[in-house]
């Protein structure tokens, strides 16, 4: 760390908060975490982690645990099908640094188990069932009062408290999440042994995906336009999910048919948060979904949260807290915005489909799908390299 060891309070123990706790502790900071949930309890379903996220997990010392618990897709294969089950095209995702798998599926609860185990290994204190009740943000540090009645003074406070961030409001940033018009229906199933690829099925204005998440399980996810503020009673979720995606046949059909009262299903309305810079006020910085929640179409929100953590830790190694905060947003915003913009465009293009737009879609996909993957990951790699360059310049200066 640059100068005296900074003390850092992380508010929120989701992907961003857990990753930051690990990265900053590894970098030598004195870190504490407060999480409002009384126990680590995370929404069911799975999550994709692409190679850029897996590279971050390697930096966090958590990759082996993730590879053990999750399912790395052999060859990074993604198979596209029409809704009736007709194959369209196969694409492959790029591997990461030093041959990190291209894409891995994992149950969310397993991802958190691995991250929280690593936090415990590093001896980072975590207070569950605790949140911030008051905050005084001064130039030299932040005085914080917590819901357990204690208080403390920190060099830096991270608001890693997700899309509906209370910390965002506390530092005076008046930005509410924007509903995108999409709902996502997700379910966990036993995995037929032969189903080892990521599958995307193309409906009309709907998508249905299948993703292995362990040796024994997979998860399905369907995206569809839903009314703003729609409420669906959880006991109706199995029936509603099966009805919404009933036109999907082929590999989807047996999975939809088995949905029932015992199924682990989750409905989520998709919202987005796009904050203008700066993402900090004084010594309080927002990271993860609190600053840049994305629609899920590129499966990158979690990776962006992990990358925030890794980048912040690197910046704090060579810069003062204030200089690191100034650099952080400038370095991270282009990458996060790129992901948000592409993901939003993909979602909107899908939602706008009608019969006319569908004519020739499969043909077009056969011609362009792999090029689209290459272009997205090429640009992501370029932006990451640019960010690396900006961080390394200071690292070199400090070393010389
Ligand atoms: C349907 C859907 C599918 C997705 N699929 C993928 C995917 O496949 N791959 C991917 O990379 N990303 C995916 N994402 C995005 C990813 O889930 C998020 O980007 C990621 O979870 C953000 O992590 P976070 O830690 O910033 O926020 P969160 O995960 O929301 O964590 C915030 C934490 O803060 C806690 N908290 C909240 N308020 C307070 C408070 N006041 N005090 C203390 N603690 C508090 C919460 O309890 C929670 O633990 C998906 C998102 C959606 C909606």
Image: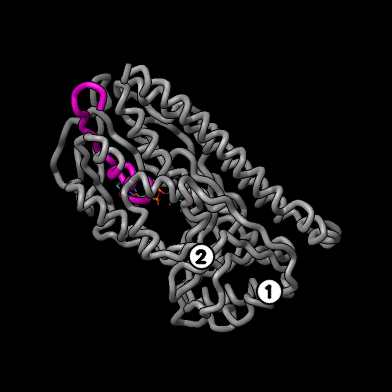
Q: Give the residue at x 79% y 61%.
A: 362
From the Cβ of disc 2, is ligand 1 less than 8 Å away?
no
Describe residue 160's horizontal placement relative to residue 386 as left or right: left
Quadrant location of the C terminus?
A: top left
Q: Secondary structure at mark 2?
A: strand
Point out the stretch of residues depicted in magenta: 1-22
Q: Give the residue at x 57% y 39%.
A: 380
Q: Which mark is residue 248?
A: 1
Q: Secondary structure at mark 1?
A: loop
* Pointer 2 residue: 267
In contact (CB < 8 Å): disc 2 and disc 1: no
Residue 342 visible in the displayed image: yes
From the Cβ of disc 1, is ligand 1 less than 8 Å away?
no
Describe residue 97's horizontal placement relative to residue 134 as left or right: right
Describe residue 370's horizontal placement relative to residue 378 as left or right: right
Of 229 and 304, which appears nearest the observer? 304
Give the farthest residue toward the front: 98
First in sequence: mark 2 vs mark 1? 1
């Amino acid at each position: 760390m640059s100068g005296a060891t900074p003390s850092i309070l992380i508010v929120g123990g989701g992907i961003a908060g857990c990753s930051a706790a690990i990265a900053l502790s590894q970098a030598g900071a004195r870190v504490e975490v407060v999480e409002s949930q009384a126990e680590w309890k995370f929404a069911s379903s799975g999550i994709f982690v692409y190679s850029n996220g897996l590279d971050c997990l390697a930096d966090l010392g958590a990759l082996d645990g993730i590879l053990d618990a999750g399912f790395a897709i052999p060859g990074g294969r993604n198979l596209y099908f029409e809704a009736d089950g007709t194959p369209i095209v196969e694409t492959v995702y790029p591997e990461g640094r030093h041959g990190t798998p291209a894409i891995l599926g994992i149950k969310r609860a397993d991802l958190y188990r691995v991250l929280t185990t690593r936090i415990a290994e590093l001896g980072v204190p975590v207070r569950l069932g605790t949140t911030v009740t008051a905050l005084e943000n001064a130039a030299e540090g932040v005085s914080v009062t917590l819901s357990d009645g204690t208080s403390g003074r920190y060099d830096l406070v991270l608001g890693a408290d997700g899309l509906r961030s209370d910390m965002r409001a506390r530092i005076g940033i008046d930005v509410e999440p924007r509903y995108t018009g999409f709902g996502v229906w997700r379910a966990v199933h036993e995995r037929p042994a032969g189903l080892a690829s990521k599958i995307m099925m193309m409906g009309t204005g709907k998508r249905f995906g299948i993703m292995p998440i362990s040796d024994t399980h997979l998860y399905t996810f369907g995206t569809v336009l839903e009314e703003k503020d729609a409420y669906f009673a959880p006991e109706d979720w199995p029936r509603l999910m099966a009805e919404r995606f009933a036109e999907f046949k082929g590999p989807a059909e047996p999975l939809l048919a088995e949905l029932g009262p015992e199924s682990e299903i989750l409905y989520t309305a998709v919202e987005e948060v796009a904050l203008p810079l700066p993402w900090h006020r004084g010594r309080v910085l927002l990271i993860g979904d609190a600053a840049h929640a994305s629609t899920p179409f590129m499966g990158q929100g979690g990776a962006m949260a992990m990358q925030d953590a890794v980048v912040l830790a690197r910046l704090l190694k060579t810069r003062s807290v204030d200089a690191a905060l100034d650099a952080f947003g400038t370095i991270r915003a282009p990458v996060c915005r790129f992901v948000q913009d592409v993901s939003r465009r993909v979602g909107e293009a899908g939602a706008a489909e009608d019969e006319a737009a569908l004519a020739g879609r499969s043909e077009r996909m056969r011609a362009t799908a792999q090029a689209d993957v290459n272009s997205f990951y090429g640009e992501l790699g370029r932006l990451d390299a640019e960010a690396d360059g900006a961080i390394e310049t200071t690292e070199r200066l400090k070393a010389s």
